[in-house]
């Protein structure tokens, strides 16, 4: 899409970013718009098109030709992460991988790429790394299998895609995007989602692909602990217990030069999970939300609480309805509303001006972002 | 719970309804509160307890001894429902069943039952009826199977339960409630959800239980239509197409005498659905939401659009953040925001004062409610 606009240069990119008002088509498909443009191009002269462009800029009093600021934020899970548990080598591994993902995503945005492309690419890198609980490196379920969830949302169109409980998808975030772009649906689960993937030429991977020694040992330990507990009176496992483990997810939110927001989240769930449990990561509104008018959010934490508060949508809604800035909305939901019901974790969020927020109520959250000076920053612990 | 309070009469019921402020325990469990009360009762005299009660009423300036108004609303799906398509006999069948469910639910509330009990019982009646696309009477998937989704939410605690893609559960709404009350999770899907059900003594039913001749014929016709289309160039099936079919769901929202809200929704999805598609019905925030501070909502329509707008949570959030009344919030989301992105359907909603709203942007929505005079009302078409 961007390529086809190159002939018009930066000025046209600006108009593309403002198509919201320009064509009054905020809620319509980019494809439809592209078709409209092609029609116009074919039937009227380039000169008339320029007049339209200038008229649009005049109408909306936005004569500047600068592009939107572009930026992205990444998360790799929140939880009990302390310096004491971490070796310098492991810290460097996390930092290097987060930096690699961050720089790759930023590079996409710099080259006029879309926020959706940046989000998908960043998350694929993190899914492919065994360090994070998503894709390769996913934790094991109670049955010793791996079941993955992911979702993605386009802030320009409010289109979204999600998959849950898939077992043979190397990059669930890409399948979520395929669902968004190539199906009439938002959410596909289990074998059905994999059948859809196959039908669209996605190569399935065997379960063994997801095996990592570290996760397998975590799984064996969880089973062992469960066995020890089984002699004691059967107690209700409170979700609070899981706050002692890392809430493994990966996520990315981005704003591109056209002013479009996108958000995505991917996870392998929680170690030893049972009963086809689905957390907040694939739930649009809970783990992921994006709306150009407000913000893009990706969440990580005790998923059940994030679903009950519709955390990602709540941050967006607070901005929409009260006009508070992103930082205030994200802080209120994560640091006040969530703890009130016992939920822990955090979010990464970005608004249409490039402001970012990364509140979390745990001891740590893997996170990376481009700072105001354009410099990449990686952080793990509370400051 | 209610029974144990009976000795104190209505005045104590009122206090139970106001435990939010009284014990500053809005987000805590009713069970915990019951324990506290028992402790208090055991260790201090009844007189002291009365003093506490009176003090609480004085503090919050709500000295009236009346109970909350109680009320409920039911929906049985929205879509293209016109008088021309309907026979008087069929209309009577729908009306009778909706009335039966309504009166049963209302009876529960009258007898001091909880809104959760009313919601679950009402939805079970509709699930057990072959008239509605939920439980018995669910539509067939592309594979000729039945896959059911449901969710329920407690406005007092913000606890929620949901199941998706279950095939052998007679009453998915009851399983959703079991997930809410007997697991640490919110959402369970597929075989895992059924394993959880079995583990809790829920008897599974064979797929044949869900067979109805009407749905089977609809399925065969959908397959036939698909076959006819297959000669033509393969077109992307737009979600808009489904607006031509009935958006089959059932749902209920209720306010009980204690001032607690609850919402629930159940569905068999869409005829000939593929790929483990999950709509909005089991998505907390999209198809179902309840929060004592705002409202309880159950949605029905083209699910994908309801997910993208987080419709049920959005209505609640608009009330929370702008202070608009329920009617305005529900109207804005259903009649303005939804049509803008192409979504059709409707919601039923109730607030903490017993105000109700039932906006829909289709030609009809099966709905039933108790009017201001306490009279049951059933409606199908637009007025």
Image: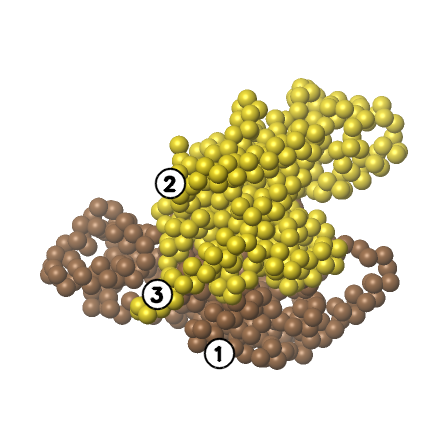
Chain colours: A yellow, B brown
**Mark 1 belongs to which subunit?**
B
Q: Are marks 1 and 3 in contact (CB under 8 Å)?
A: no
Q: Earlier in the sequence, mark 3 or mark 2?
A: 2
User: The C terminus of chain B is located in which quarter?
Assistant: bottom right
* Residue B27, horizontal then vertical, whole percent: 34, 52
Q: Is residue B186 visible?
A: no
- Give the structural element (helix, strand or loop) at label 2: helix
Can you identify the residue that label 2 sits on? A84
Chain designation of label 3: A
Does A281 sit left or right of A226 as displayed?
Answer: right
Q: Mark 3 — residue?
A: A229
Q: Which residue is mark 1?
A: B203
Secondary structure of the residue carrying tag 3 is helix
Residue drawn at (64%, 50%), measured in percent from left and top? A171
Q: Is residue A61 visible?
A: yes
Residue B183, position as x, y percentages in the image: 42, 63
State whether discs 2 and 1 lie on one chain. Answer: no
Between label 2 and label 1, give the one nearer the viewer. 2
- Is B249 placed left or right of A52 in the picture? left
Viewer-proximal residue among A347 and A351 = A347
Give the mark toward the camera: 1 or 3.
3
Label 1: how many residues lie within 10 Å, few (<14), some (14-19) or many (20+)?
A: few
Question: Which one is in front, A341 or B214?
Answer: A341
Q: The numbered mark 2 sits on a residue in which chain?
A: A
């Amino acid at each position: 899409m961007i390529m086809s606009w190159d002939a018009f240069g930066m000025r046209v990119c600006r108009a593309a970013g403002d198509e919201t008002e320009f064509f009054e088509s905020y809620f319509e498909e980019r494809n439809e718009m592209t078709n409209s443009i092609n029609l116009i191009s074919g039937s009227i002269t380039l000169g008339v098109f320029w007049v339209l462009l200038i008229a649009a800029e005049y109408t909306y009093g936005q004569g500047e030709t600068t592009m939107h600021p572009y930026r992205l934020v990444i998360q790799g899970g929140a939880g009990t992460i302390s310096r004491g548990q971490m070796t310098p080598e492991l810290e460097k591994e996390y930092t290097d991988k987060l930096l690699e993902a961050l720089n790759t995503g930023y590079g996409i945005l710099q080259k006029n790429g879309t926020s959706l492309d940046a989000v998908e690419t960043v998350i694929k890198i993190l899914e492919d790394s065994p360090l994070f609980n998503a894709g390769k490196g996913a934790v094991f379920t109670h049955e010793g299998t791996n079941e993955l969830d992911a979702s993605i949302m386009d802030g320009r169109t409010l289109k979204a895609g999600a998959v849950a409980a898939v077992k043979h998808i190397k990059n669930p975030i890409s399948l979520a995007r395929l669902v968004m772009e190539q199906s009439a649906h938002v959410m596909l689960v289990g074998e059905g989602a994999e059948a859809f993937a196959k039908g669209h030429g996605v190569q399935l991977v065997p379960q063994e692909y997801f095996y990592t020694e570290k996760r397998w040992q975590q799984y064996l330990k969880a089973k062992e602990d469960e066995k020890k507990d089984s002699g004691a009176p059967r107690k209700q496992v409170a979700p609070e217990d899981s706050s002692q483990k890392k809430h493994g997810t990966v996520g990315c939110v981005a704003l591109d030069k056209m002013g479009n927001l996108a958000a995505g989240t991917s996870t392998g769930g929680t170690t030893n999970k049972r009963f086809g449990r689905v957390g907040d990561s694939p739930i649009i509104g809970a783990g992921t939300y994006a709306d150009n008018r407000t913000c893009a959010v990706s969440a990580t934490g005790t998923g059940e609480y994030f679903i009950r508060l519709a955390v990602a949508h709540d941050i967006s809604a607070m901005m929409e309805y009260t006009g508070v800035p992103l930082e205030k909305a994200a802080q209120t939901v994560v640091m006040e509303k969530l703890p009130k019901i016992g939920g822990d974790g955090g979010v990464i969020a970005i608004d249409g001006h490039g402001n970012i927020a990364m509140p979390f109520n745990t001891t740590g959250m893997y996170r990376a972002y481009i700072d105001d000076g354009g410099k990449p920053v990686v952080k793990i612990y509370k400051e």
